[in-house]
Image (cartoon, coloured by chain):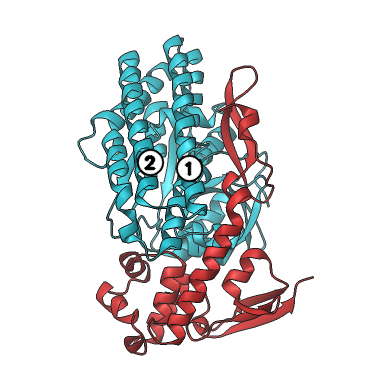
Chain colours: A cyan, B red
């Protein structure tokens, strides 16, 4: 069976796409950028030496799972959440919810999603998808990264839901429980933007927000010392492109999607200054896109000497400077 | 980014990009991955070299099968320990060939689950002849070689049925 009237739609990002999908199915007409913006999804964090990662890395969105929590608080919607110790109970509950005709979001390790080509699969415990039905022993999956719905066998879904490790899903699932009768979008948008500005400008942790960008710029020149060889360094440098573009960001490390949110928000709460800022952020995103393309090019050419890494570092410093100015302006506008 | 600048023709990996439309509005566009469209061959080239290098170390006894797979799937020591729920110091020992033999069957089963391989593959590397050369199946499946190798799990956690056939 497939849940009645469930419409699969591709989205830029798995978590914002999943939440949007559940809200749309429940009858709330809201876009993915609006969900992302209200949830203060835009972010930056750099991790130079972290035990969970085999190599320095960075993130461009807020903590996984936080978007749902922020959306609940700010829109007044309610999601019912479940986690499990016992995989059997986890599967029984999921099946029951599907029988009740509820599309149910699940957190999984992306590595076990065997509908994904093997070369794309990595161990990451924070992939979100919607389970939209079950036929025999195969689940019907609405994964925002795929143009059509896909199938996944029960064993693989269980492996993904109950993978251990950093941010392990513990069988986590959620579904829409209740929509409010009215939503104060002005308040929700304002709160979402204020929090995003706080994260980018004022969070007192040296590797997060704009400070994190500068740390990334400073430390990227040290990456060769972590690499096994030139090909490994090339791979990691080219991953900058993946993290900014291919890993579900809507382009330029979510900057294009956040610009879209600001443009929609400007019209929604009649604040034309946000529209101007959305144009500015689109241009800032173009600069991030140049970093993506530059990283891919020098990685491919194995042109990874100190001069090129310094150039990359300067490009990142430049993004930190323009984003600091941008978020200060945004913060002033939304006060 | 303007809509026409963002479009990439690569049906194998589609994604959503937010772009500026002709009317000045920003919105989603379905497109192909720029990176995959332009750099997939380089990625496969590096994966193949990585696998061959690791396999050589595996064969000459400088690394254990656990290390071989840990590097291939890009896991840190801490993350592998967390995922297998085996003490980090013990995982560290199992990375060395001389201590790999002390791993219990239960521990090997946990490693295999994390690497998503049959336990048997911790004791063998499946090579397939492709264009005159033997290559690891792990790499060949990436680029759709002529031979498919399918490991079918059975009711026993230790037994796998490996089916080898020509692709249709």
* Label placed on residue A294: 1
Location of mark 2 (residue):
A311
Q: Quadrant of residue A28?
A: top right
- Is disc 1 placed on a helix, strand or loop? helix
Which residue shows up at 31% across the image and 45% down it? A46
Q: Earlier in the sequence, mark 1 or mark 2?
A: 1
Instruction: Indicate the position of residue A41 as horizontal and vertical percent values.
Output: 40, 35
As drawn, the residue found furthest toward the left would be A204
Residue sitting nearer the eye, B50 or A143: B50
Which residue shows up at 42% across the image and 27% down it? A75
Could you classify mark 2 by the number of other residues whose Cα lies within 10 Å: few (under 14), some (14-19), or many (20 or more)?
A: some
Q: Is residue B115 above or below residue A168?
A: below
* Label placed on residue B76: none
Which residue shows up at 65% across the image and 64% down it? B143
Parent chain of label 1: A
Disc 1 from disc 2: Cα separation: 10 Å
Q: Are marks 1 and 2 in contact (CB under 8 Å)?
A: yes
């Amino acid at each position: 069976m497939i849940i009645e009237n469930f419409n699969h739609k591709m989205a830029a990002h798995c978590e914002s796409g999943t939440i949007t999908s559940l809200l749309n199915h429940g009858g709330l007409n809201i876009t993915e950028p609006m969900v992302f913006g209200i949830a203060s999804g835009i972010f930056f964090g750099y991790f130079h030496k972290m035990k969970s990662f085999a190599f320095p890395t960075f993130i461009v969105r807020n903590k996984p799972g936080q978007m749902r929590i922020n959306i609940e608080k700010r829109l007044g919607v309610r999601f019912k959440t479940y986690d499990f110790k016992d995989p059997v109970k986890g599967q029984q509950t999921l099946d029951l919810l599907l029988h009740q005709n509820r599309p149910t979001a699940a957190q999984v390790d992306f590595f076990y999603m065997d509908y994904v080509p093997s070369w794309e699969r990595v161990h990451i415990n924070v992939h979100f998808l919607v389970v939209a039905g079950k036929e025999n022993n195969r689940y019907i999956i609405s994964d925002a990264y795929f143009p059509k719905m896909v199938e996944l066998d029960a064993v693989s879904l269980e492996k993904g839901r109950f993978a251990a490790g950093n941010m392990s899903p513990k069988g986590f699932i959620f579904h829409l429980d209740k929509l409010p009768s009215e939503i104060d979008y002005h308040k929700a948008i304002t709160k979402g933007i204020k929090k995003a500005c706080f994260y980018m400008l004022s969070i007192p942790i040296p590797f997060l927000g704009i400070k994190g960008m500068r740390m990334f710029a400073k430390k990227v020149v040290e990456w060769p010392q972590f690499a096994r060889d030139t090909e490994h360094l090339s791979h990691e440098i080219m991953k900058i492109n993946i993290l900014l573009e291919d890993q579900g960001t809507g382009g330029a490390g979510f900057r294009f999607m956040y610009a879209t949110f600001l443009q929609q928000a400007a019209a929604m709460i009649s604040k034309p200054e946000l529209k101007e800022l959305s144009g500015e952020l689109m241009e800032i995103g173009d600069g991030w896109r140049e970093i993506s393309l530059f990283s891919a090019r020098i990685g491919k050419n194995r042109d990874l000497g100190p001069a090129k890494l310094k150039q990359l570092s300067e490009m990142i410093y430049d993004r930190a400077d323009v984003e600091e100015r941008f978020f200060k302006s945004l913060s002033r506008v939304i006060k | 980014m303007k809509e026409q600048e963002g479009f990439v023709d690569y049906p194998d990996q589609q994604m959503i990009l937010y772009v500026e439309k002709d009317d000045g509005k920003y919105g989603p566009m379905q497109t192909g991955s720029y990176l995959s469209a332009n750099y997939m061959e380089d990625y496969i080239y590096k994966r193949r070299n990585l696998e061959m290098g690791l396999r050589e170390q595996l064969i000459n006894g400088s690394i254990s099968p656990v290390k071989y797979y840990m590097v291939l799937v890009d896991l840190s020591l801490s993350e592998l320990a967390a995922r297998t729920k085996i003490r980090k110091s013990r995982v560290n020992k199992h990375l060395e060939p001389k201590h790999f033999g002390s791993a219990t069957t239960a521990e090997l089963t946990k490693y295999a689950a994390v690497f998503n391989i049959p336990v048997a593959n911790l004791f063998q590397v499946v090579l397939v002849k492709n264009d005159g050369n033997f290559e690891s199946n792990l790499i060949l499946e990436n680029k759709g070689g002529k031979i498919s190798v399918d490991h079918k799990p059975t009711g026993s956690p230790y037994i796998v049925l490996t089916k080898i056939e020509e692709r249709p």
